[in-house]
Image (cartoon, rainbow, N blue to C red):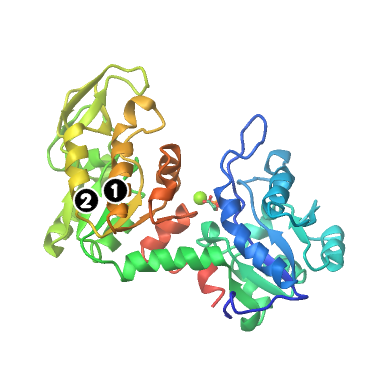
Amino acid sequence: MTSFAQHNFANQKALIRVDFNVPLDKQTLAITDDTRMTAAIATIKKVLNDGGSVILMSHLGRPKDGPEDKYSLKHIVKHLHSLLNDDGKTTNVFFANDCIGDQANTTASMLKPGEVLLLENLRFYKEEEKGDADFAKKLASLGDVWINDAFGTAHRAHASTAVIAQFFAPENRFFGLLMDAEVAAAEKVLHKADKPFTAIIGGAKVSDKIMIIENLLDKATDIIIGGGMAYTFMKAQGGKIGNSLCEDDKLEMALDLLKKAADKGVNIHLPSDSIIADSFSNDANKSTAPSNNIQDGWMGLDIGPMACEQFTNILHHSKTILWNGPMGVFEMSSFQHGTKAIATAVAEATVNGAFSLVGGGDSVAAVNLFGFADKVSYVSTGGGAMLEYFEGKELPGIAAVK
Ligand code: 3PG
Ligand code: MG
């Protein structure tokens, strides 16, 4: 691997794997959140400014069986064009209806310095997810160099994210600027964290977060657990959780995690109280209860006021913060207070000098919703990729570039 910043891409065709798997409105197919696109623009512009040309490849959604209009990357071409032409330059953006084959080959070969070609959704071919080497080779033939800037897809060992690497000499493989920034932020938290280091882990299911918690037990000083998963811990300790979410087959494992944490001297913080509701609805009747004493017919849908204060206090004393997963059902206005309180506390800690990294689809959506994205140190574009990174795994899309 060569340093992207130091390389001059003049007269080269750079094949860049980006993660333009952006959410689209179901009816209009308009982009509802373009974070992943804006995050890749610096890499693209650096190649163009050097006098190179760019061939972009990405997936969009999870098409099952070949091309499907709603998953076509043609829906994002116009927006890509506007993002690349916001500085008075004229950058041509072409689109190939198929990521391999004659049209892609011809358009790529005729691409002039400063021009961009976006290829159609890679996942219209089964070969992409299978990591098929022949398919990867066809893609590779389009470019002189391969740049992986798709951090959000780095946990997939697919043709375009990993298998393709073998068709480029090490000096022609690069991390893009987004990949560099993601890895630097994650490494800072995992290996260079100033203490106290608090991890906030939320979301619905414990089962999704076991491995990240296990890995963090060797790194964090404090772990805050919120969201639906907290009730599995409550029940495991003999609490009454009413109709709250619970993974009954994970009770023992929850106790085991608590024991391991105690053995390692890591403080686990569970929400002392909850906002409870008599149905899973924004208009439900609401009340407050201790998280371990919720009556039948009621369920915890957010952390309560005491928990907000308890968690805010911990965060205000933290020097490093990792946040993955919301504290409650923040999509419903009645149950977003806890997640908002945590976002506020993370922002305040950041102003006071803490390094804060937010990642994982839902917590990122939350900081965006509450307007805190520019008040934390780093917002990751990775959901599953970020989670696996913090589970301590080596991501195929990162290993392949090296
Ligand atoms: C994501 O959004 O998680 C990435 O783009 C990867 O997509 P996938 O989960 O469908 O592999
Ligand atoms: Mg995913």
Residue 234 drawn at (x, y percent): 18, 40
Per the image, the residue denoted by label 1 is 348
Count of marks overlaid on the render: 2
Q: Is residue 262 left or right of residue 61?
A: left
Q: Is residue 320 left or right of residue 379?
A: left
**Residue contact between numbered discs 2 and 1, judged by CB atoms under 8 Å:** yes
Residue plotted at (64% across, 79% down) = 7
Residue 275 % position (x, y): 24, 28
Front residue (pair 195, 50): 50
- Rendered view: 135 above or below 330: below
Judging from the image, what secondary structure is the residue with disc 1 in? helix
Q: Amino acid at mark 2?
A: His
Residue 254, above or below 281: below
Q: Quadrant of the N terminus?
A: bottom right
Pointer 2: what residue?
A: 316
- At 31% from the left and 42% from the top, the residue drawn is 344
Precedes in sequence: disc 2 or disc 1? 2
The response on whether ligand 1 sits within 8 Å of label 1 is: no
